[in-house]
Image (cartoon, grey):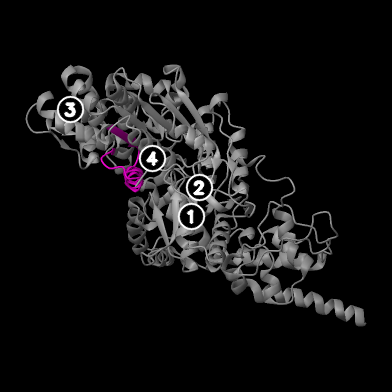
Amino acid sequence: MGSSTDGLDPEQLAAVRAPRGPVCVLAGAGTGKTRTIVHRIAHLIHAGHVAPAQVLAVTYTARAAGELRTRLRALGVHGVQARTFHAAALRQLRYFWPRVVGGEPWGLVDVKLRIVGQAAQRAGTGTEVDVLRDLATEIEWAKASLIAPDDYPAAAERTHRQTPAPPEQVAQVYRAYEAVKTRANLLDFDDLLLHTAAALEDHALIAEEFRDRYRCFVVDEFQDLTPLQQRVLDAWLGRRDDLTVVGDPNQTIYSFAGASARPLLDFTRRFPDATVVRLERDYRSTPEVVTAANRVIAVARDRPAGARLRLVGQRPTGPEPRFAEYDDEPAEAAAVAGRIRELAAAGTPLSEIAVLYRVNAQSEVYEQALSQLEIPYLVRGGERFFARQEVRKAMVALRRGAADEPTGELPKVVRELLAPIGLTPDPPPGGTARERWESLLALVELAEELTATVEDADLARFVVELELRAEAQHPPTVEGVTLASLHSAKGLEWDAVFLVGLVDGTLPIQHADGDDAAIEEERRLLYVGVTRAREHLWLSWALSRAEGGKRRRRRSRFLHGLIPEEHPVSRTASAPRREGGRQARTQCRVCGAPLVGTNAVKLGRCEDCPSGLDEELLARLREWRTERARALKVPPYVVFTDATLNAIAEQRPTDPAGLVSISGIGAQKLDRFGAEVLALVARGTTQSEHVANG
């Protein structure tokens, strides 16, 4: 089969037909970069410039490498080496090992944390699993950044690393880790790259043999290159320049792991004669999604002018992105699950729907909401909430605590039991410890939710509730909605994408504040999330974490300028109410205008429209709420917020359907308080009729 270039756009064709030598393809999201890469390789081969076996194409995931090989075969090209950096290095190192080191090649580390644990013990640091994970992350960052143990403390200080232990102590662990590994004749993944580079740098004959074998290099995702990978690439190239790189500086999201867009941005400085091609035609997303993506990244700081890509949508028009604000996370998750059910009913496969969030700890509320609607889901890049080690430990601690029949307020009891596991009063700055802390905090918030909805809830009842939730969150492994962090969604795409939890402190993440570069990386994360959507895009946030909590959160600063000014930032009309209730009102019941703001949605009218509030009914409702809260031993707002009472006093519902149409009243509160509230309303109505007839 030939390498026909039919169907390539002019920019793609320019990249494909660029002469041998340095070529830089700046490829925006959805612009057909993989297609361009494979056609360029095929063109070079079919034109006789290079043999298939002389091409080495490297990318970042085995999946992407496999896709390259498959597409090349479809173009009649066989024999090209398409591998990840590590796979290519492993193959080369095994071939050259007898001549460079001698004897059998060393084995690969299979359980890194075991060796890190031995090193941590020697250095006197903590050996808890989350600490070991963070130590392993620091070692990986240092090696990817070409930083030796002795240089780590200064580098950590210079780059403002949030280290799991004092930098000097981390350096001791790093040093001990290398010693333990070497004594056991083991290599980790970073060693594969280090030893491959060293073999080519220090052994001229080996370098000559390698460079005679491979003449042409292609590197994908070049914006995520680490200094270590750059060193390997330089060793591969030698003094040659037959190199094609493809990348998008707008999608640099792995700086925490040592990646940098600098090699991509400086490519023409290193290779002044390089051909530069910009791919900006987006074939993935509708123009509406593309416009949102461009708005997200347009205000980013420190973007070199030559690297600024502005996507141009090529697909037919589609629905506008949806923006929605909720009082709390359970309401947000319920609305997302309801919208997913609508999309599925309209024909969107569940495998073409994704819910994306900043940190894995956010998944639990969505696992719960999808489970309640019996919508299957898959968690990508992380464990299901109740399968996480810290949650399993917490369940054990709570079961033991329940056996002792502790007294006191349930949330306080839960906090005390989880403190030894890692639930400190203040959150850790970041890393695995922060994710673990967030998971434990989520359990406390579930306790608060149970206290607010179940009278006399105790620890034993809470444990039963958790076990029921855990059981419900194990649907059969079938086609399902993808739940994933923004990082793990990189390189993927879906018909419908829900970007959730968009509040300051989560996106951007709290520990990024004060670091301009970190804030800009958080902005790029949102950009990556937006560009995952082909057609349907939903962006939402909640003003509090737990149901009935104080609405202290602010929507993400990155949404400024993204939400159209005329857009009512409220619950969307199609988002069903929580727990099967009626849909929230989105138009003023007085003047018919769209409702703008949470309070307006709660009241069902514009804030400056006549209220028609029944003051006597409101007084009765407040008195009733005080008594109920006292009996339940909860704050009054847990029963109903002031805004909900005002809405009841204004709208004076006469039946359950009218009551649940008011924002803040779901099925549970209807079951618990509905009859009493309707009786209070009816009493006022009867008195009014009596006065009128008198």
Depicted 5 relative to depicted 380: above or below: above
Question: Which numbered disc flags the more N-terminal residue, 4 or 1?
Answer: 4
The percent position of residue 316, horizontal first and vertical second, equals: 61, 52
Asked if residue 410 lies left or right of residue 635, the reply is left
The residues bearing labels 1 and 2 have C-alpha atoms spaced at a distance of 9 Å
Q: Amino acid at mark 1?
A: Ala
Q: Which residue is mark 4?
A: 38
Is 156 above or below relative to 548?
Answer: above
Tags 1 and 2 touching, CB below 8 Å? yes
The answer to whether residue 507 of the structure is visible from this angle is no
Q: Which residue has dot 3 on it?
A: 179
**Distance in Å between CA atoms under marks 4 and 3:** 43 Å
The disc at residue 134 is: none
Disc 2 versus disc 4: distance between alpha carbons?
22 Å
* Position in image of residue 444 (x %, y %): 46, 54
Estimate the x, y position of residue 389 in percent, counting from the top left.
Answer: 32, 51
Q: Is residue 164 above or below residue 537?
A: above
**Three-letter amino acid code of the residue under disc 2:** Arg
Mark in the foreground, 1 or 3: 1
Residue bearing the label numbered 2:
532
Mark positioned earlier in the residue sequence (4 or 3): 4
Considering depth in this image, is 509 or 406 the residue closer to the camera?
Answer: 509
Contact? badges 2 and 4 (CB < 8 Å) = no
Few, some or many C-alpha atoms within 10 Å of disc 4 (few <14, some 14-19, many ≥20)? Answer: many
How many numbered discs sit on the rendered protein? 4
Is label 2 in a helix, a strand or a loop? loop
Range covered by the magenta-colored residues: 55-81
Residue 151 visible in image: yes
Residue density around tag 3, few if under 14, some if 14–19, many if 20 or more, within 10 Å: some
Circle number at residue 354: 1
Sequence-wise, the earlier of marks 1 and 2 is 1
The numbered mark, 2 or 4, whose residue comes first in the sequence reads 4
